[in-house]
Every structure is written in structure tokens, then in C-alpha cells.
């Protein structure tokens, strides 16, 4: 958590970032708190169920820590292993929001971060749109839960996310560009030819043409120059950018910024053809098989999301699994009466060594 010097307004998390953070000794109290919460509320339950509750509590505690340092919102990731589970995503999102509200954190400061699979996009639509039959719903489910649909790699996903009325999407600039690494050279390629940056402009044009209100939070930047390039196109720039400390430091250290931006203007995007495809049924209706087929057919044409989404989910799911198994160990140590709930030897233990 090294952003205090950069005046960050919003923040985001994922399972990999959480695992890295809580592996540091100065954040061990977050683990202790999560373990204590799970044991107090689920003492007689199985370790897996306890670990799941501890994981949720840990995410919320990390979110609260971050919110204490920023004026805006924090994006909290659901378990990436739920990426294709519509019902599981909705339940997890509601559980997380309930925990935040129990700690007096308004849901308006939380974005539930969901992978932009078709199940994830449908879940975001359900969460963002209050149910019409409010008398039949618990009070906590009558208000929208705001979402950040992440792992967006093409215009098809971006369009579906906007049709779902997601609050925010997170297109991954660097991963889109790396798909075309065979023709990429950091010293030769002009920034306006950068495919990831072009995607941001295309999405912005599409949203403007259709009147979509979903905001764009560009993520996955690899170089400071990419950030400068995306920011200079004011009419086609994202609403926010997600930047790691390395990129922030690089931007602060740069000189002669004007000479690093492109000189040749890019082609003007107009968002044509944006209203031809509908990927979702109306809120509250059952799954539209034909709409899902249109979505999948168009993903096949674009191809990149079919490759990149599973690739990214694999890494996030692996780290979520490591975190869960380590929480199980901490829970067992605590129940066994260990003098300290913190794992002996710290957290630098391989997954195979703690898998139960």
C-alpha cells in the first residue's frame, strides 16, 4: 500500500495482489482477524467452509484499509474460481457487500470486480438492476450492487458489459498488445498503432455512439508512455486508469514528456455498427440462449478473449487456491491451540506444502 504520495482516488484488488500483500509480516494482523472471525462464526463447520468465510472477511478488511487512504471506491474481486458460475457470483457479491455494510462502509464505495465471462456479465446485470418484485426480496437485495467487469479484451465483451449496465469495465491494455507481440517493438512501434490503446478508443467511441453510461477503467499498462498516449486523446480517453507503483514512479520520473507522444493522429473512431448486436435479455428475464450464442459467435471472430480470459483466470485462481489453503492451515493451528495463529515460518511456503 504505497500510494499515499500519488493522490490516488480509487483502487483495485485481485487474488494475486492480496496474496502478495498478506505475505508481508506487517499485514499478518489481517490474517489473524480473518481467522478469528471464521472461528467465532463457524466453529463447528468444515475447514473449507471456514476458509471461504475467512477469505471473504480478509477481502473486506483489505478493502477497508484501502478505503481509509482514498476518497473514492475500491474494487474487490470475487473468487476467480466462480468466473463461470452465475449464481455463485451473485451470492458472493451479496455476501461481500453485507460484510462491508456491517462495518459501516457504504456499498456506493464498493465495486464488485467480476470476470467478463458471459456468466459474469449476466451476474453484473442482475446485481446492478434492482429487482422489480421488491416485496418478495430481502431489503438488502433491493438496492443495486455496483460492479467492475474485468478481463475485457475486445469490443464484444465491452458492448455486453455496457448492455448489462455495469458501472465500470477494466480493459487490459498490455495483454491485448502482447497478443500481437510478433509485430511489436517497444522502440519502433508508434504508440497510435498499439492495439491495446486502440481498444480503449474503440470502446469509448462505441459507448458514446450508443449512449452507454458504463465507465472505462483502463488497466494492465506496461510502460509509462502508454499512459501518456491514452490520456492525450481527451474525447476517447478512459475515465480512470489503474496503475501499479512502478508505472506511477516512471511517470513521475519522466522528462520531455511532449516528445514521447505520437505526432501522427490516429484514425477517428465513430462507433458505427454498435447497435446491431444485443447480447443480453432484459433484466429479470431468464437466460436468452440466442443472445448468448451471438455473444459467443462474436467472441470467436475476435478470438482474443477466448485465449486471454482463461489464461488470466488460471493465474488468479491458482493464487486464490494458495490463499485458501493457507487460511485452512491457520484455522487448524488456531483450533489446535497454537500460541500464535500466524503460520510458523511465515507465509513463504509452497502450495504443495500446505495443500490439504
Image: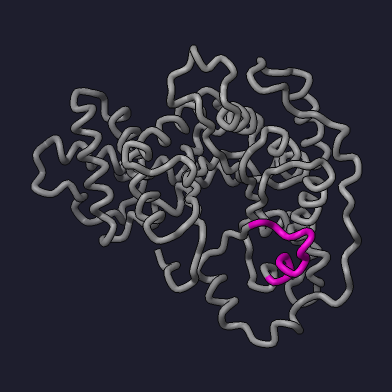
Is residue 340 shown left or right of residue 173?
left
- Rendered-image quadrant of the N terminus: bottom left
Instruction: Give the quarter of the figure containing the C terminus.
Output: top left
Prevailing secondary structure class for the magenta stretch in the rendered image: helix
- In the rendered view, tell whether residue 268 sits above or below residue 262: above
Q: Would you say residue 238 sits in the magenta stretch?
A: yes
Q: Residue at x 45, y 67 (%)?
A: 3
Could you say which quadrant of the image residue 138 lies in?
top left
Residue 304 percent location from the top left of the image: 74, 45
For residue 168: magenta? no
Residue range in magenta is 228-239
Q: Is residue 214 left or right of residue 124?
A: right
In the displayed structure, 13 sits above or below 225; it is above
What residue is shown at x 74% (from left), y 24% (from top)? 292
Q: Is residue 84 above or below residue 9?
A: above
Specify how the rendered protein is coloured: one colour
Residue 219: percent from left, percent from top: 62, 56
Task: From this view, report whether residue 196 is shown above or below residue 319.
Answer: below
Q: Position of residue 242 (x, y in %)?
A: 57, 59
Return the residue nearer the eye: 144 or 247: 144
Residue 227 at what x, y percent from top left? Answer: 67, 68
Amino acid at each position: 500500500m504505497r500510494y499515499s504520495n500519488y493522490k490516488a482516488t480509487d483502487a483495485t484488488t485481485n487474488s494475486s495482489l492480496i496474496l502478495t500483500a498478506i505475505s508481508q509480516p506487517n499485514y499478518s494482523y489481517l490474517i489473524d482477524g480473518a481467522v478469528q472471525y471464521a472461528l467465532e462464526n463457524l466453529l463447528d463447520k468444515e475447514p473449507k467452509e471456514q476458509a471461504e468465510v475467512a477469505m471473504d472477511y480478509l477481502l473486506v478488511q483489505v478493502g477497508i484499509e484501502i478505503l481509509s487512504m482514498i476518497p473514492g471506491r475500491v474494487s474487490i474481486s470475487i473468487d476467480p474460481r466462480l468466473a463461470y458460475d452465475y449464481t455463485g457470483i451473485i451470492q458472493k457479491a451479496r455476501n461481500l457487500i453485507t460484510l462491508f455494510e456491517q462495518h459501516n462502509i457504504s456499498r456506493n464505495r464498493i465495486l464488485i470486480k467480476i470476470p467478463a465471462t458471459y456468466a459474469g456479465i449476466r451476474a453484473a446485470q442482475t446485481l446492478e438492476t434492482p429487482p422489480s418484485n421488491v416485496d418478495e426480496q430481502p431489503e438488502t437485495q433491493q438496492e443495486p450492487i455496483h460492479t467492475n467487469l474485468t478481463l475485457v479484451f475486445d469490443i464484444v465483451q465491452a458492448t455486453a458489459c455496457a448492455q448489462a449496465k455495469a458501472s465500470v469495465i477494466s480493459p487490459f491494455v498490455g495483454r491485448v498488445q502482447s497478443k500481437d507481440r510478433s509485430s511489436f517493438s517497444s522502440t519502433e512501434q508508434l504508440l497510435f498503432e498499439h492495439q491495446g490503446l486502440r481498444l480503449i478508443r474503440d470502446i469509448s467511441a462505441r459507448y458514446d455512439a450508443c449512449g452507454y453510461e458504463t465507465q472505462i477503467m483502463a488497466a494492465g499498462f506496461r510502460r509509462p508512455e502508454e499512459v501518456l498516449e491514452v490520456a492525450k486523446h481527451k474525447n476517447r480517453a478512459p475515465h480512470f486508469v489503474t496503475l501499479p507503483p512502478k508505472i506511477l514512479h516512471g511517470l513521475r520520473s519522466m522528462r520531455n514528456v511532449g516528445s514521447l507522444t505520437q505526432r501522427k493522429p490516429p484514425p477517428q473512431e465513430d462507433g458505427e455498427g454498435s447497435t446491431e448486436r444485443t447480447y443480453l435479455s432484459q433484466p429479470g428475464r431468464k437466460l436468452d440462449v440466442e443472445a448468448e450464442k451471438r455473444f459467443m459467435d462474436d467472441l470467436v471472430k475476435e478470438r482474443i478473449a477466448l485465449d486471454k480470459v482463461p489464461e488470466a483466470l488460471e493465474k488468479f485462481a491458482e493464487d486464490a487456491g494458495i490463499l485458501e489453503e493457507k487460511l485452512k492451515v491457520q484455522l487448524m493451528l488456531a483450533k489446535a491451540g497454537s500460541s500464535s495463529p500466524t503460520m510458523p515460518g511465515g507465509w513463504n511456503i509452497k502450495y504443495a506444502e500446505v495443500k490439504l
